[in-house]
Image (tube, rainbow, N blue to C red):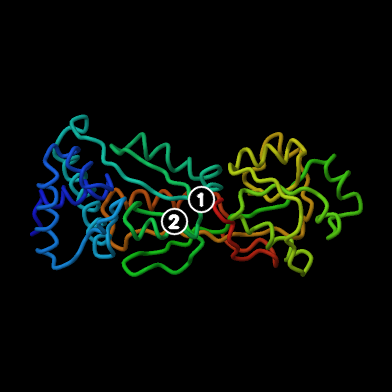
Amino acid sequence: MLDRDQLATFAAVVEQRSFEKAATALSITRGAVSQRIKALEEALSSVLLVREKPVVPTAQGEVLWRHVQALRLLESDTLAKIKPEPELAPVPLAIAVNADSLATWIPTVLWPLMKQHRIALEVITDDQDHTLRRLARGEVIGCISTEARPATGFIAEPLGAMEYRCFATRSFADEHFAKGFTLQAALRAPAVLFNRKDSLHDEFLQNVFGVKVENYTKHYLPAPSTLLEGIASGVGYGLVPTVQVQGRYATELVDLAPYHPVCVSLHWHHWAVEPPLSQVITALVVAEAARTLTPGLASQSCGDSAHGPA
């Protein structure tokens, strides 16, 4: 069996990203931290940490870090069945999601999870292309990604597709697209994008017009709610998740290209062998996605597209 003190020290170094900070957190000396890590590496015949600033786990260290997190969740579940719940310390855990999911359907999963379980939850927003790396490093126990194929040791649950449509205010459409949504008008009218990594708008224009379109005026508003408010204020037009356009937005905004919705297929990646609490999270995510997301492609123009960090 692995030494508990060595595992705790390894976890502290990974979390603090520093031998010195880990020593402070554990109330031991820097030398004691080094000795425990060295003994653990010798026991496993593997280098577990890259000794740089910040300190990060190696590929073998990432595997061990996921093991430590699983042990924490299993221990918390066991203690919850033995001891009164108020005596238990919250279990820290993190998940990674894209910004548009966080702005629309994921909060319905988060609130009951945070109320009903003794956890200290961190939600990390990141580009769908980068969330998988966070999962592999053990930074999160699950993530939303556009990637359908899971890495070894993980499972990818298909969640459905988030549908995007191209919206603008009626007055903006009358001013900039009086003759319809044409290529010439799209090149002149200011568009609102999430940030410079956001490729969804480029792909949308290419799907509509059949040519690659890049040189057009762009505003960048890196928050889904601000992006939607900017469009509703008439500063530009842009792609917004259909589920986000509700209330006054549903009456104020018009769809500039009703026959060209864009669908982004999402997947929930998680450990292949999950502790009970992780299973609960996976079940909540999958169930809410089934209620909210499009189960299939909404039209011929819908397909797997990357929306950058949103």
Number of residue marks: 2
Q: In this image, 282 relative to 244: left or right?
A: left
Q: Are marks 2 and 1 in contact (CB under 8 Å)?
A: yes
Pointer 2 or 1: first along the chain = 1
93 relative to 200, above or below: above
Q: Nearer the viewer, residue 199 or 88?
A: 199
Residue found at x 13% / y 48%: 33
Q: Amino acid at mark 1?
A: Asn
Quarter of the figure with residue 205: bottom right
Residue 18 placement (x, y as % from top left): 25, 47
Q: In this image, 231 relative to 62: left or right?
A: right
Mark 1 sits on what residue? 98
Residue 122 placement (x, y as % from top left): 38, 42
Q: Residues within 10 Å of mark 1 (few under 14, many from 20)?
A: many
Residue found at x 68% / y 37%: 229
Q: Nearer the viewer, residue 38 or 8?
A: 38
Which quadrant: the N terminus? bottom left
